[in-house]
Image: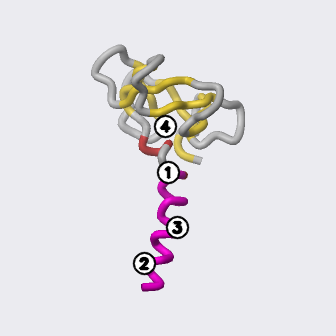
């Protein structure tokens, strides 16, 4: 019973921190109807991303598309689901 209680207490903390790690692949930027709200920052990011033309099947790699997207992203200044930073190398979860 104690193990179940500990799991239920710590599971939400683990899953909230990993939300950004699941967002990679083909990305479409939208103004409404988004899957996630993202705030772009210069530091303290949850996810470092690299824009690519191919090879978007790894964490932190985004290919921007107009259709056939995996995720719809809305860029916001506050109320974000996670924070992201664009990088040239070292992409992935932080």
Label 2 SS: helix
The first of marks 1 and 4 along the sequence is 1
- Mark 4 to mark 2 CA distance (whole Å): 33 Å
- The residue pinned by badge 1 equals 18
Q: Are marks 4 and 2 in contact (CB under 8 Å)?
A: no
**Between 46 and 60, which is closer to the camera in this rendering?**
46
Numbered circle sitting on residue 60:
4
Q: Give the range drawn in magenta.
A: 1-16
Q: Are marks 1 and 3 in contact (CB under 8 Å)?
A: no
Residue 19, horizontal then vertical, whole percent: 48, 46
- Mark 1 to mark 3 CA distance (whole Å): 13 Å
- Mark 1 to mark 4 CA distance (whole Å): 12 Å
What residue sits 51% from the left and 52% below the top?
A: 16
How many numbered markers are drawn?
A: 4
Dot 1 crowding, Cα within 10 Å, few <14, some 14–19, many 20+? some
Hey, which quadrant is residue 65 in on the image?
Answer: top left
**Between 34 and 25, which is closer to the camera in this rendering?**
34
- The residue pinned by badge 2 equals 4
The answer to whether residue 91 is left or right of residue 62 is: right
Is 43 above or below relative to 65?
below
The first of marks 3 and 2 along the sequence is 2
Numbered circle sitting on residue 10:
3
Hey, which quadrant is residue 79 in on the image?
Answer: top right
- The dominant secondary structure in magenta is helix
Label 4 SS: loop
Q: Do the residues labelled 4 and 3 touch (CB within 8 Å)?
A: no
Residue 82, horizontal then vertical, whole percent: 56, 39
**Between 55 and 24, which is closer to the camera in this rendering?**
24
Is 62 above or below relative to 32?
below
Dot 3 crowding, Cα within 10 Å, few <14, some 14–19, many 20+? few
What residue sits 40% from the left and 24% below the top?
A: 33
């Amino acid at each position: 019973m104690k193990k179940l209680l500990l799991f239920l207490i710590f599971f939400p903390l683990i899953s909230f921190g990993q939300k950004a790690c699941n967002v990679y692949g083909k990305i479409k930027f939208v103004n409404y109807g988004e899957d996630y709200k993202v705030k772009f920052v210069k530091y303290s990011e949850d996810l470092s991303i690299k824009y690519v033309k191919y090879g978007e099947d790894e964490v932190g790699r985004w290919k921007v598309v107009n259709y056939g997207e995996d995720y719809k992203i809305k860029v916001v200044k506050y109320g974000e689901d996670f924070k992201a930073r664009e990088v040239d190398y070292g992409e992935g979860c932080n």
